[in-house]
Image: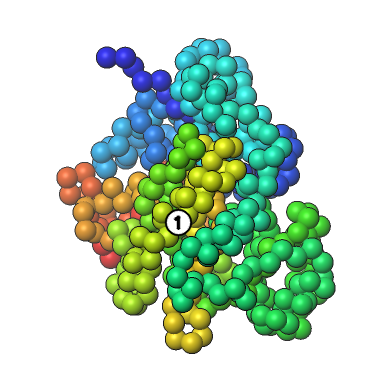
Amino acid sequence: MKKALPDIYLFNPTCEYAVANSHTSWQPNLLLQKMEEDLSTLPLFFSRPTDVVLVKKLPPESYIEQLKLIGIEAPRFFRRKDITTDRKFLKAPKSRLLPWGWSPAAHQLLKPLKPSCSPEFKSSPVAEWKPEYREMYSKKFALGILKRVLQLLPEEKILPPDLIPEICTTHNELEELLSRWGKLMVKAPWSSSGRGLQRITKTPVAPKVWEKLLGIINEQDYAIVEPYLDKVLDRSIQFSLSNGKVHYKGISRFFTDEKGQYQGNFLNGWPDTIEPQAAEFAETFTGILVPALAELIENSLLAKYYEGNFGTDTLIFNDGQGRLRINPCLEINMRQSMGLLSLQLEKLLVPGVKGVFKIWFQKGKSFLSFQNEMHEKFPVQFKNKRIESGFYPLTHADESTFFGAYILAGV
């Protein structure tokens, strides 16, 4: 039997910022670099044992042994800094390069590996970066899809026309929308996981807040401005795109903090604390929305210029009249996502067991310290190499790791 060629994975969740910057030498700030380092093994949950995950620091053998408890045979881990010096690795045949997300900086980092990739990868639209790709990664592109998909959906259940987000380039335009909507959510066009957001819920707006808002416009040319809605639920529809065709992969249910920053995902359905009416509304709308989004994406530039996984975030909200409505395309994430990862992680739980997947960070405290506390409070229980209950760390922990990822199940 012919041995499968390895796919090469890279965890670079700051890819949207790299796209916004456009320079091949772009680097995230030190805290985000640390986040990428500490969570760098996460792509293993998408991988096969024959694949390679690029990391800054190799995980210890104890971490690889820990994965066997949930039936995972780890891929090969390879240090990023050795890409250009290890001639054997450079020349070895490879299938595809699969960073978390593409950007000019990701292409530059992975460039030495391209010659040894498969013909299928070399002929794909993501094999090289083109300047025209930049706008597709922006929230302006998602806004265009939103305006079109709203025309295909029942108007009594969707975002009404007077609440559709707008593009702002000046202080006066922001003032006008604040006067119209009262409360705003202002977003940087290229950002992810709830970063690059600024709520405006009080007037007059503080000078420091104005400084941040105008900073977004100065850095990225414009801001996307939405009315601040009475959110009930967050959901993401996960798709993949290949050869111009969209394939539905599933629904992820996520949650954010009060500032809109991503906190984690619910696993195996909504928790019992979620209002049944809201959960039912969200689930029944899926059958209408998925084919509508798929058709629009297949007829957009995305189908021509992109290949890989992507997710469309949606927002269920209360319209103030006692009715639930949906923003069916809040943004489009053209990359791997925590939502897609959560669909993989659901397979690690005993069927029917609910849980949460979370990313952890607490200033001044190591992930190891947090892990020790959680092991004591919620000792993990396995059944047939699946998690039945308790705390299970998904990333390596030691005194130097500030970020971590984990599952908490059945509690």
Residue occupying the point 61% across, 70% down: 164
Residue 142 image offset from top left, x and y in percent:
59, 55
- Residue sitting at 43 percent across and 47 percent down? 239
**Residue that carries the numbered disc 1 in the rendered image:** 292
In the image, residue 107 above or below residue 240: above
Residue name at image x 35 percent, y 46 percent: 344
Q: Secondary structure at mark 1?
A: helix
Residue 300 visible to an observer of this rendering: yes
Whole-percent x, y for residue 197 in the image: 64, 64
Q: Pointer 1: residues within 10 angstroms few (<14), some, or many (20+)?
A: some
Residue 375 visible in the shown view? no
Of the pair 326 and 14, the residue shown nearer to us: 326
Residue at (35, 28) in percent of width and height: 49
Judging depth in this view, the residue of 354 and 186 nearest the camera is 186
Q: Is residue 84 above or below residue 327?
A: above
Image-quadrant location for residue 390: bottom left
Above or below for 114 versus 130: above
Q: Is residue 373 left or right of residue 257?
A: left
- Tag 1: amino acid: Ala
